[in-house]
Image (cartoon, grey):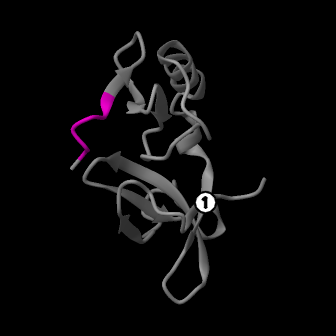
Amino acid sequence: MLPTNWIEHRREDGERVGWIVPDGGGFRPVDVLGRSVTTEPVDWLEAEETLEGLGIGFLADRYLLRMPDGVERPVRICEVGAEGVTVVTDDFGGASAVGSGSERIRISFPAPAALRLASS
């Protein structure tokens, strides 16, 4: 469940790109993974511009998910919502292959620090 003070922000085409959260005298842009995008609060216009500039393309990137046993698994994001984030394992780049049998893993929202962008 989203906090009641999170204000949804959508691009002109209607695609949700995150939320704007009041923070002191400013606002904090939060991406669709539920993660703050700036280190400090910004004004409303900058929060909007930051989210629109970020977009949702980063969701297509490869990530690493640190499992409870400490092993990091390569994953791709397949679903994002306030109810949770679902990733699929991407061993050997097979996440997008039809019939790959990739494992689906549900993690919390906001996405935990255990999910991080893989180095390119």
Residue at the far bottom in the pictured view: 69
Above or below, 36 against 97 in this view is: above
Q: Which residue lies under the disc numbered 1?
A: 116
Q: Main secondary structure of the magenta part?
A: loop
Q: Is residue 4 magenta?
A: yes
Q: Position of residue 112 (x, y in %)?
A: 47, 63
Q: Residues within 10 Å of mark 1 (few under 14, many from 20)?
A: some
The magenta stretch spans which residues?
2-7
What residue is shown at x 52% (from left), y 26% (from top)? Answer: 51
Q: Nearer the viewer, residue 63 or 17?
A: 17
- Circle 1 sits in a helix, a strand or a loop, which is it? strand
What residue is shown at x 53% (from left), y 27% (from top)? Answer: 55
- Quadrant in the picture for residue 92: bottom right
Amino acid at the residue labelled 1: Arg
Residue at the far top in the pictured view: 12
- Quadrant in the picture for residue 85: bottom left
Relative placement, left or right, of 109 versus 5 is right
